Amino acid sequence: MAILSAVLQIKELHKRFGATVAVDGISLSIEKGEIFGLLGPNGAGKSTTVNMAVGALQPDSGEICIAGQGAPSKPEVRRMIGVAPQELALYDEMSGVENLHFLGSLYGLSRTTLRTRIGEVLEEVGLQDRGGDRVGGYSGGMKRRLNIAAALIHNPSLLFLDEPTAGVDPQSRNKILETTERLAKEGTTIVYTTHYMEEAERVCHRVAIVDGAKIKAIDTVANLISEHGGQDTLVVEFQDETLRLQTEKPLEELNRLAAERAFERFHLERPTLEQVFLNLTGRSLRD
Ligand code: ADP
């Protein structure tokens, strides 16, 4: 039954560009209301996967099925999808409202529906007071938020956010994360592409670790950390040095150290997604 209820189902997707294998057998299944993270370094194959899932790129082989209705190449299936791409498609000389009006009319929304939806989506991203201003005067973060509002204008049930917080100010970043969480609570299914682990840890219900055109693991953040994170790190601060020790028995280690010499402070660090990534791929996501 899980397969029938999936909002996005991808099976054995393959894509190459010349000699470059961009996507090599990716499969995943995402449920309604889920925020699903695609986490991986540049060149991992995230955008290529997303481009195929939204129907912008034809796979070499594999299957994509949206809400049980078939491939995104069908116009009625395409309509269920909203995409906020990394490259902004906004007109600087128009206001926020005018941009949304233009983009919304491309979906064939009526004037009345458009007027209501524009108000709703501006509020959704916290731009209700700035809708009348020229987009050219927006900050980078406000433009990103308007970009998300545009992706929501036709009320899609499946939303793709591609690095939505890349290079934005902390206030906009918070707004974007809050919007993402609220939309999911209201039933929108969200595919969230990022290379920021802290964000994936905060908003994603499940995360796929993508590297080298393949998915290395898919699970909740908590499960990924407990299965692939490795041991906790005991950090002990002495007067003249700080000791970092990976251990399964931090209390025993601490007792042993205390018997040897006095320390000033200690704390325990749980493994993070960064450590999971390192353990699964042999390299750091920050490289
Ligand atoms: P990510 O989104 O994880 O950064 P991409 O899906 O953009 O990764 O890229 C995966 C691989 O495919 C990279 O090696 C990239 O250079 C290559 N690639 C992506 N798009 C194209 C294209 N249109 N033409 C040629 N190579 C491409």
Image (tube, grey):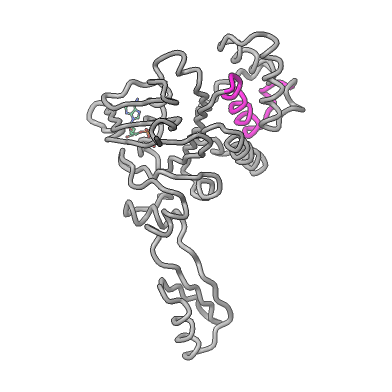
User: Residue 247's quadrant in the figure?
Assistant: bottom left
Residue situated furthest right in the rendering: 129
At 45% from the left and 49% from the top, the residue drawn is 220
Task: Indicate left or right for 90 with 95 as reference.
Answer: left
Residue situated furthest left in the rendering: 19
Task: Indicate left or right for 168 with 62 as reference.
Answer: right
The location of residue 37, given as percent across then percent down, is 46, 41
Check if residue 275 falls in the magenta segment.
no
At 45% from the left and 72% from the top, the residue drawn is 244
The location of residue 101, given as percent across then percent down, is 65, 14
Task: Indicate left or right for 200 with 216 as reference.
Answer: right
Residue in the foreground of this view, choosing between 110 and 256: 110
User: Residue 179's quadrant in the figure?
Assistant: top right
Magenta region: 133-155
Q: Which SS does the magenta portion mostly show? A: helix
User: Residue 170's quadrant in the figure?
Assistant: top right
Which quarter of the figure is the N terminus placed in?
top left
